[in-house]
Image (spheres, grey):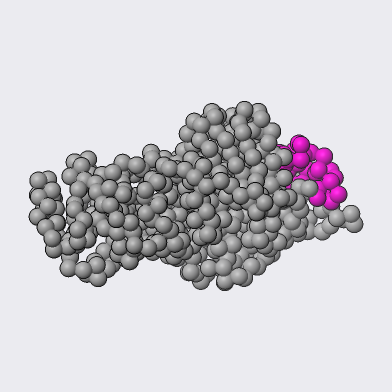
Amino acid sequence: MTDLPATQHAIQFTGPNQVVHNRAKSVPAPGPHQLVLQVEAVGICFSDTKLLHAFTAHPRKSEVLSGVAPEVLAEIPSYTPGDLPLVPGHECAGRIVAVGEAVTRHSVGERVLVQTDYRHLPTAQANAAFGYNFEGGLQEYVLLDERMIVDPVTGERFLIPVGEAPSGSAVGLLEPWACVERSYASDERATLTPGGRLLVVAEPGHAIHGLDELLAAVRPGMVRCLLAEDGHGPTLAGVLGAREIPCRPASSLDELAGEPFDDIVYFGASAARIETLQDLMAPRATIDVVLGGPEVDRHVAVDVGRIHYDLLRWVGTPGDSAADGYAHVPASGELRDGDRIAIVGAAGPMGFMHVIRALTMGIPGLSVDAIDIDDARLAHLAAIAGPLAREAGLDVRFLNSRSDPPPNGAYDDVGVMVPAPPLVLQAIAMAAPRARVNLFAGFAVGTRATIDLTDLITRGIFLLGTSGSEIRDMQAVLARLEAGRLDTNVSLDAVCGMEGVKDALAAIEARSSGGKIVVYPRLHELGMVRLGELPERFPGVAAKLRDGRWTREAEDALLAQAGSTDRSDDGEPA
């Protein structure tokens, strides 16, 4: 077991927009059930900037409500919810250097990738996460508790073992690549929620059809209804009675306020009613809008933030059968043979990953349009993605949408990387019938895009979005890395030490970075250095690049000089 130092360098968020480089943060010794990870490398994420601005208002900075005993939380010094100072950094690679005597699943010396998303530990609006309400990796050592980093259902560890071959940066960058993976691999639900809460609402003149088909496949736990006084009650009662499903009517939507539903089936075309129903959707809920002929009377303000964070799904049909809306739900967001793909915001760090994933998955016949508004960043993307496309025999184009607008109605898959509501509308316009529109960008919950819902439903366009990743996503990307089918360092644009974190956060927020930025906590005073600057600033490190890309050898050359806070006259770390 490594002798731990008394203090360390750490980056802390101490309040909204307050970043501190703490040069003497204490290093806690592990308790009986705890372990200490020495951090190798940490990626900077756009989500870190959102946490910095929101601080206590961020849904993942709040207290854990269940899933772990309060007395266990009280024993964890790295649990920092509410207004406590927080160490961010969730894209993390490290090595276990100390364990408590009661630790059974982890061993000193293991090199690991950190799975950050604690879905089994809910907060009021989200779930707990490493780097949010538990301290993250932007420090030299981080403490974790084994009682909360093992999946209670599968028994899988949240610290995923990795081999010695990949660089620390390649391992740390697996986390954002895994988030990209989740956005395609996430299973979509084409039925009612088993045992869930169903709400049925029907307007005057809209007949109830198709519910019997949905109920034949899945039985909800309870049903509530709000029906016009024109014969719908007996129709619904007959459908539910045949299956012995109780239903409790409501006199108004106001009566249902505060009752979240897993499925809402709406027979009607009132935008105002649809917007009210949207507020009754529980996390992971589906709303099925059955138009029955008429068009929605105006555009609908859809909360695109909840599509991303709460996994809400909108389906529907221009016809009169509720079953038709669910019938068009795809199994997942995975790309299909021959798909035509558009990535909006492709030259940013995350868009870059979506483009590279599409070109390296071995899916035949894909064509990819990488769309951005920055010619320099598009050129950087083209230099890396172009050869990969040629090697795979795929077509890729790099388009500046200001000078070369993408065609409407042309794409089978559209990814939105920038959290701007107008781009959601552009993506829907670009989508072909039955297309999937992936709202990957982290729209804040409450962000509304005013959507022509009739058009969306008529063309069968499916809006999907995911947040974070699961262990299986990390394992999938790790397998591709270790097999040599993916180099996560391909997305790396800059490196820095602790003193460069503020500049790195600013670059990510300004979208001036052509890729990811990785921090090495052992390099205390190193500022941010783009890879293109290495030949001039650090020629010894630059000599270890491969075709301009970061490598394990380049990382070793940089870290060989770690441990000093001084600099030599030529700007190299002393």
227 horizontally vs 23: left or right: left
Whether residue 553 is visible: yes
Residue located farthest toward the right when viewing the structure as drawn = 569
Give residue 242's position: percent from left, percent from top. 9, 46
Give residue 4's position: percent from left, percent from top. 63, 54
Per the picture, the main secondary structure of the magenta-coloured stretch is helix
365 horizontally vs 546: left or right: left
Foreground pick, 305 / 374: 374
Foreground pick, 327 / 80: 327
Give residue 266's position: percent from left, percent from top. 26, 56
In the rendered structure, does residue 545 fall within the stretch colored magenta? yes
Give residue 94's position: percent from left, percent from top. 60, 46
Residue 453: quadrant of the picture: bottom left
Residue at figure coordinates x 60%, y 42% from the top left: 369
Residue at figure coordinates x 51%, y 35% from the top left: 339
Foreground pick, 320 / 387: 320
Q: Which residues are the magenta region?
A: 533-559
Residue at figure coordinates x 73%, y 50% from the top left: 376
In the rendered structure, does residue 406 fall within the stretch colored magenta? no
Does residue 14 sit above or below 153 in this rendering?
A: below
Whether residue 40 is visible: no
Residue at figure coordinates x 79%, y 38% from the top left: 544
How many numbered circles are shown? 0
